[in-house]
Image (tube, rainbow, N blue to C red):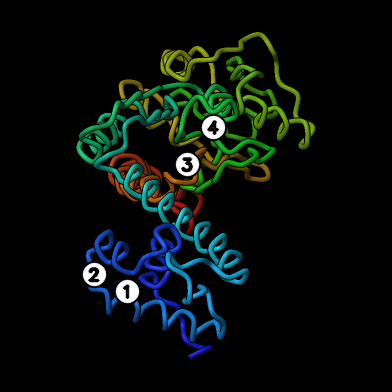
Amino acid sequence: MADSIPSLKWFTTFQSLAQSGSVQMTAAQTQQSDSTVSYHLQNLERHLGTALFDHSCRPMRLTAQGATYLRYVEEVLALLDQARSDVTTLAPQTLRRLRFAMIEDFESDIGPEITRLLATALPNCRLTHYTRMSHDILDLLRNRDVDIGIATQPQTPLANVTEMPMLRDPFVLAVPAGSETTAEDFVQGRSELPFLRYMGSQIMGMMIEAQLARLRIKLDNTHELDSTSSIMALVAQNGGWTITTPSNYGRSKRFQGQVTLLPFPRKTFARTISMFVAEPHLDSLAQTVLTAMRSQLATHTIGPIITAYPWLRDGYRLLPD
């Protein structure tokens, strides 16, 4: 008996009996018969190999061993109650608040579908949906102002935040359609068109500048913008060229007929787009959103772009492989 696993019923019966000191009162409180109460207590005492009560007293009193054991039993039962409460409170149907943030790259094609999914899965939840740049979303996550965020992976991991890598988004050149200038000539500055930079305060901008510095490539610094749409509009109007990613190109559908992608001509590099979860109890919900995001990306973003640019097939892909 000493090697058996104690029953939860033994614990609850023992706790009630310790409070009342009476088998009859415990039976009434726990809706058991007197014999069942006695049976559970006997099993627990045999399991421990010691008496928990002085059975000669009325009302029954705990022995020293019983008093010590009661403290542990109460801790176990309190933890179980807390766990039950947490699980019930955090079930999707009963979740009361969710703050969700997504980078602007996916706001048109994928954002509405994910919002619909969350609204359907969380019928009683107050949903707040932010659309921001990656560095803003990462700040919101650090400050615990959002619960789940989709953003570019930072250079330094976020503390106490779960990261779920989702997409490898390689850097490419975006140039005016019909341009005969080679990718190498563009990065060597042998084009009459200006280089359109992303703002250095953005993660993408920092990654591009770091790679250019590693490759010792120096380009003019007359144009710096924080809007992909503005950059693509200028490229489409033959007003410049840029280093961007397929996902950024994909969101600028109105300009795609006037913009062409070229492979980055030197050592390739890419950003990782991940889902970040600031609250551990939301991991399960985040996995559901991640599955939906991967499906939407494959259908609306990766598929069409790879069809147009087959050379991106190996580099532009969902993560993990």
Identify the secondary structure beneath mark 1: helix
Callout 4: 10 Å neighbours few (<14), some, many (20+)?
A: many
Mark 2 to mark 3 CA distance (whole Å): 50 Å
Mark 1 to mark 2 CA distance (whole Å): 7 Å
Of residues 7 and 194, the one nearer the viewer is 7
Of residues 247 and 75, the one nearer the viewer is 75
Amino acid on which the number 3 mark rests in the picture = Met
Check residue 3 in the rendering and tell me which mark sits there, or answer none: none
Identify the secondary structure beneath mark 2: loop
Contact, CB < 8 Å: mark 1 with mark 4?
Answer: no
Q: Earlier in the sequence, mark 2 or mark 3?
A: 2
Judging by the rendered image, the residue that carries numbered circle 2 is: 32
Amino acid on which the number 2 mark rests in the picture = Gln
Identify the secondary structure beneath mark 3: strand
Of marks 1 and 3, the one in the foreground:
1
Contact, CB < 8 Å: mark 1 with mark 2?
Answer: yes
Judging by the rendered image, the residue that carries numbered circle 3 is: 275
Amino acid on which the number 4 mark rests in the picture = Leu
Mark 1 to mark 4 CA distance (whole Å): 77 Å
Amino acid on which the number 1 mark rests in the picture = Val
Q: Where 265 sits versus 24, above or below? A: above
Of residues 228 and 272, the one nearer the viewer is 272
* Residue pictured at 60% horizontal, 29% vertical: 142
Judging by the rendered image, the residue that carries numbered circle 4 is: 173
Of marks 1 and 4, the one in the foreground:
1
* Residue pictured at 75% horizontal, 24% vertical: 218
Judging by the rendered image, the residue that carries numbered circle 1 is: 37
Q: Earlier in the sequence, mark 1 or mark 3?
A: 1
Q: Where 69 sits versus 314, above or below? A: below
